[in-house]
Image (cartoon, rainbow, N blue to C red):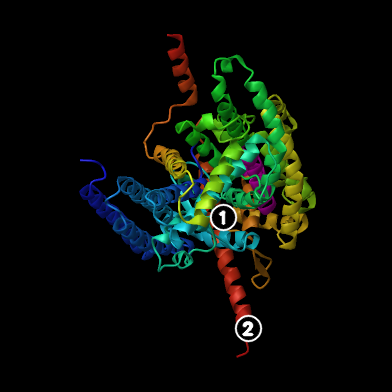
Amino acid sequence: MTIYSPKLIEEYVLETISRVRVIKEQCENLLSKDFASQAPKNLAQTHINICHYLETAIKSIYKDIDWKNIKKIESSFILLQTTDSIIREFGSHIRYIDGAQTQKVPWGLISPLEKYLKRFLSDVEILFRPQWKYNYAIIPTNLYEYYSKTLSSYETHVKNKNLSEILKPLKKYFYIVSFPSIERENILLHCLLGHEIGHLEAKTYISSRNKEFLKLIQDKIADVVNQRIKKPEFKNVPEEIMPQIKQEITQAYLKETSEIWERGLEEILSDIVGSFLFGPAILFSNLEIALQDLNGLDITPGKDNNYYPPWRMRLRNIYQVQRDLKLFPLQKKAFQSKPIYNNVSKGFKLVENIIQEKSDEQMLKSNDLLKIVYEEIENDLVNAKRLILIKLSELFLLLNPDSFYKNLSHLIEKIDFGVPPNPYENSISKRKPAAIVEIINAAWFYKLSWKYRLFDKKNQFNENIFSKRERMNRLALKAIEYADMEKDYSDWSSEKNRKPS
Amino acid sequence: MASFNMSEKAIIYNYILLTSQITIELEDVFAGKKLTEQQCELLKNGAILLSKIIEGATLVEGKEFKNGLTPSMEGLSIYGYALSTIRELNLIRNIKEKEFTEFFEELHNKIQKLIENRVGKGIDISLLKNFFYTFGVSLRGDVQKENYPTEKILSFNKRKQMNDYLFT
């Protein structure tokens, strides 16, 4: 019995349809759950529509099989197998919806974070979800485009359904952003989500420069390949297949070079965007993540590390944004408390010492390919940073040192008193909700201001400092939620007052 | 071939489906049938795929871009699969050095002619059929690769294993 027997194919079709129906059912169940934003529900509804669409496609492909022609049966079976593969792949996306349930996310943070980031990227819908893997990440592929591109081939099989109708619940730009589950309540690292959003801005810049970059490296790569094929390992290659080998090597080199460029530029630009959006907090949180890296600060970008640029270079760029914005050096007048001023300044100095060393740049110069790419990245950073600055300034999102530091001490003091730092309030009638960026930075500055010993005189672990850290997280997370509610209420009431009765 | 991101995956899925659909339609042409309007539409997508391959070939061969084509990452990636197809079908004998672009332009002309004439008379349908079929096979191989559960071996250990193998 061959694999193309009608009985086997019939059974396979039945199982595939069962799979698609299970996905639909699971999405329907998830729709009844509670979510901190609309994004997961929109994704669930889209999947329900996609399941209907794919079930129709499977039935149509099966009915159209020409059982008299073995080649046609084989190709139709491949269509069915590929559809099944797509179904299994799409089915794995349910984990994004499931993970975004209210009880699994820092729910007080999601809505305010969404609102803040939407001021920067207004057309974008983001689904935030925790993941057990320790990683802050974005899937930089637009899910709308991904589904649309994948499903477009079925238009010949499903004639009476429009693809744009199927994908209607999803916004035209829909992205998944993940954070490590175990950091759910760590207020200090959540600003890294600003870096993740930065990927979208970076992608836009990279797509606008892609063609130019490929043309630019064409000749340089040709030279590298010509040198390579002169090496002894190619001596015994038969002459007639040499052109093929040369094509394959050139294609691989061009692809890898553009990958190094794209990944390096993408990460650094995302850092820059995050740095503009979240201020000093992102510098300190990046330093903390850099400390986790077993490869140190000067890792060579390569396939093994997905071409990540060295941390030292990333920190240098983040630091520079803080200098450009004049957020550092700190304004002494803004800090009445000396420990805060001194210790935060020390934190900046620490980074300054790290980035003054140029071991990362020397490492990049020692490799021909990396040297070509990183010279180009340096030019790109100047242009891209200028464009980002213009955009942020037009959106009134540039952090101003005077207003940024004006109330920070007040918020830090509140945390120290065990009160959520959600408003500045001189009195009950003169209060204003704090912004998410201010609250996160207040938490960072507060933590940096601590003077403590990790182990006491009896050499016991200082549990008090651990409790203090936990209390800070709870207060800051609550503050973000309260401030958002207060702002929503105040917007609503001023809107109501404006309307004629 | 390397593993791919989601954007690449969407493209790969799209092309796997397209090459299978084209293979089915070319069977009809091979049997002497006239193409319908709908079949022609499908073959137009095949011509677009060949244009992407030409973009990749032009870039790799360092030639000038013609007919509105431009360098693209998609073209460059897809060209990798086209090179595998050439290797698989042993077509290298038909191609001179630095004339890979011309080879794909010829394939593109063949499919254009078929769309215009709607019948396969005077066109090497076998070559088109084999090309699209084998191209689909190389794409499928990459998607399937992801479905095999593999335990990652740390690259240092992998190198060590290779060295052990080489020295014994």
- Tag 2 secondary structure: helix
**A492 to A185, vertically: above or below:** below
Residue type pointed to by label 1: Ala
Q: Is residue B114 left or right of residue A377?
A: left
Q: Position of residue A351 (x, y in %)?
A: 70, 37
Q: Which residue corresponds to the image point at 68% horizontal and 38% vertical from the top-left?
A: B63
Query: Is residue A146 left or right of A8 when viewed as pictured?
Result: right
The dominant secondary structure in magenta is helix
User: Is any part of residue A6 visible from this angle?
Assistant: yes
Q: Which residue is mark 1?
A: A476
Q: Chain of mark 1?
A: A
Residue A493 x %, y %: 60, 78
> Does the residue at mark 1 contact the one at mark 2 (Cβ under 8 Å)?
no
| Position of residue B34 in the picture relative to residue A55 (left or right) | right
Instruction: Tell me, yes or no, whether the highlighted magenta stretch contains residue A332.
Output: no
Give the x, y percent position of residue B66.
Answer: 67, 47
Q: CA distance from mark 1 to mark 2?
A: 31 Å
Which residue reaches farthest bottom?
Answer: A501
The residue tagged 2 is A497
Q: Nearer the viewer, residue A18 or A108?
A: A18
Instruction: Kindly state the secondary structure of the residue where label 1 is placed.
Output: helix
* Magenta part of the chain: A259-287
